[in-house]
Amino acid sequence: MKVLLLNGSPHANGCTARALSEIAGELLKNGVESETFNIGRQPVGGCVACGACGKTGRCVFDDVCNEFTAKMAECDGLIVGTPVYYASPNGSVIGLLDRAFYSGGRFFRQKPAAAVASARRAGTTASLDVIEKYFTICGMPIVSSSYWNMVHGSTASDVEKDLEGLQTMRNLARGMAWLLKCIDAGGKAGVGPPDTERGSRTNFIR
């Protein structure tokens, strides 16, 4: 079992990374591997609705998005970490997730997921809400914790002082490990994920 940790911050060793490292350590203690994927410092553009991915199965812009979805294909769970910019997630995170879920939704479907937000003060719950909507459209069970998944501080050393935030990260990791083991046990018992019904679209034609 392996969880992909997306560091949606341009800082590879900043506040978001510190939160994810706490999760990685606790996952390991519970027998689950993890891999951190850094979004990097280059701006990530959004989807242009060209439809090419419907034919090729990958985004026409061959950048960090295709690297991310390829990693997700090999993992059993996902945790998206983002810094908070103007009370919402990093724009590059939104651009990446828009394209990744549109072009590679099959790699995410029905895998457990969670969102983590890092801020100096406010905007964390709004950011979590935005990211969790990606999960629900792909039938991904959302893993919860003992509080909203957030850490506070301007630097990684500040986050070290957010004892409740780090505690929340550890509880989140335990929840993820538990759910992955439950899914694995269910699969061994012959209980797989539910079928997804397709075909109907909302319209108001009379």
Image (cartoon, rainbow, N blue to C red):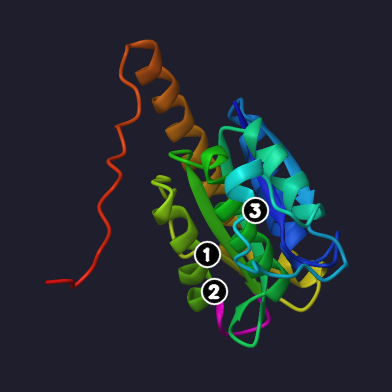
Q: Which residue is mark 3?
A: 52
Q: Quadrant location of residue 136?
A: bottom left
Q: Which is nearer the eye, 83 or 196?
A: 196
Task: Provide the residue designation for mark 1.
Answer: 131
Residue 64 x, y percent position in the rendering: 80, 54
Q: Could you tell me which residue is drawn at 61 percent across and 44 percent down?
A: 55
SS at mark 1? helix
The residue carrying pointer 3 sits among few (fewer than 14), some (14 to 19) or many (20 or more) residues within 10 Å by Cα, namely few
Secondary structure beneath disc 2? helix
Q: Relative to residue 106, is residue 158 depicted above or below?
A: below
Disc with the residue nearer the chain's start (1 vs 3) = 3
123 is within the stretch colored magenta: yes
Query: Which residue, as the protein is rendered here, is positioned at the far left?
Result: 206
- One can see residue 201 in this view: yes
How far apart are the two marked residues, 3 and 2, measured between alpha carbons? 29 Å
Q: Which portion, as a residue range, is magenta?
A: 119-124
Q: Nearer the viewer, residue 44 or 8?
A: 44
